[in-house]
Amino acid sequence: MRYLLMICDDESVEITAEQLATDGSHVAWLREMTDRGMYIAGARLRPVATATTVQVRSGEMFISDGPFAETKDLIGGFVLLDCADLDEAIAAAAKHPVAAYGKVEIRPLWTS
């Protein structure tokens, strides 16, 4: 089953792409998930200031800058994994480096 891991942390802590690419814990986690055949895709998200929110109400479109949610913890990236079950997804999320100081939310994907 496929699971989306939403990587949530405080975006005021700036980490460059270069720092992330050379961070041993992130590199090791990605290597393990890839070696186990679980990793499908993943990416960092640009800062929340670049977000656009779209809503349609009664046929009228409303567009606003920024996220809909008002929170300090924002989704800073995602990882898509193919896991045997939720227990395997939880184990993978617990090993993700951000879990040690932020949050990793797990959502199963609908299957067709």
Image (tube, rainbow, N blue to C red):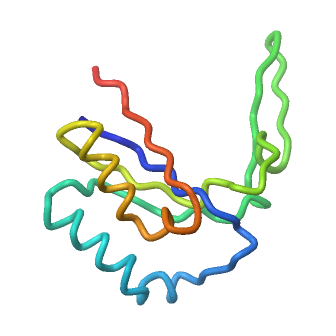
Estimate the x, y position of residue 17 in percent, counting from the top left. 53, 81
Q: Residue at x 21, y 69 (%)?
A: 32
Q: Quadrant of residue 69?
A: top right
Most extreme residue toward the top, as rendered?
58
Q: Residue at x 37, y 33 (%)?
A: 108
Estimate the x, y position of residue 88 in percent, counting from the top left. 24, 46
Instruction: Please give left or right for residue 46 compared with residue 53 in the image.
Output: left
Compared with 98, 65 (above or below) is above
| Quadrant, the C terminus | top left
Compared with 3, 111 (above or below) is above
Most extreme residue toward the left, as rendered?
36
Estimate the x, y position of residue 31 in percent, counting from the top left. 24, 73
Q: Quadrant of residue 93?
A: bottom left
Instruction: Please give left or right for residue 70 compared with residue 5 in the image.
Output: right
Q: How many marks?
A: 0
Estimate the x, y position of residue 8 in percent, counting from the top left. 59, 56
Q: Quadrant of residue 56?
A: top right
| Quadrant, the N terminus | top left
Q: Residue at x 85, y 30 (%)?
A: 62
Instruction: Please give left or right for residue 110 compared with residue 77 in the image.
Output: left
